[in-house]
Image (tube, grey):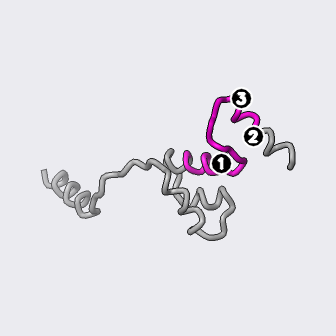
């Protein structure tokens, strides 16, 4: 075993984390936070170096994403028409 994985395990133990932590846990956590902070899935895919988007989509199952209001481009068009007709 190399020193880095042991260092992660020792640090998590000292921090009182009961879950088994690995280097990949940190990678997964980073990707999840990027998604939650609004980075699009394609950018996360590229950041992680995944070749297939399906691999990156696995990170979505734990991300707490905020939903955005759905709108139609027609709504914007109608609003612009109303403003110009006044």
Left or right of residue 32: residue 25: right
Out of 76 and 47, give the one closest to the viewer: 47
State the mark number for residue 8: 2
For marks 3 and 2 on the same chain, the one whose residue lies earlier in the sequence: 2
Residue 29 in the image: x percent, y percent? 60, 46
Residue at image x 49%, y 56%?
Answer: 61
First in residue order: circle 2 vs circle 1: 2
Residue 80 location, quadrant: bottom left
Q: Is residue 7 left or right of residue 55?
A: right
Give the image location of residue 26, x and y in percent.
66, 45
Query: Is 19 contained in the magenta span?
Result: yes
Observer-side mark, 1 or 3, equals 3
Type of secondary structure dominating the magenta stretch: helix
Q: State if disc 2 and disc 3 touch (CB < 8 Å).
A: no
Residue bearing the label numbered 1 = 25
- Residue found 62% across the figure and 37% down from its top: 18
Q: Alpha-carbon distance for marks 3 and 2?
A: 10 Å
Q: Residues within 10 Å of mark 1 (few under 14, many from 20)?
A: few
SS type, badge 3: helix
Q: Nearer the viewer, residue 35 or 76?
A: 35
Range of magenta residues? 10-33
The residue drawn where x is 86% and y is 49% is 1
Q: Residue 37's x, y, as percent?
A: 50, 45
């Amino acid at each position: 075993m190399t020193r880095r994985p042991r260092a992660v395990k020792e640090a998590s133990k000292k921090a009182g984390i009961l879950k088994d932590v690995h280097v990949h846990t940190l990678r997964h956590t980073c990707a999840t936070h990027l998604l939650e902070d609004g980075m699009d899935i394609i950018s996360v895919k590229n950041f992680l170096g995944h070749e297939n988007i399906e691999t990156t989509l696995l990170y979505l199952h734990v991300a707490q994403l905020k939903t955005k209001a759905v709108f139609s481009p027609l709504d914007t068009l109608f609003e612009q028409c109303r403003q110009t007709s006044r």
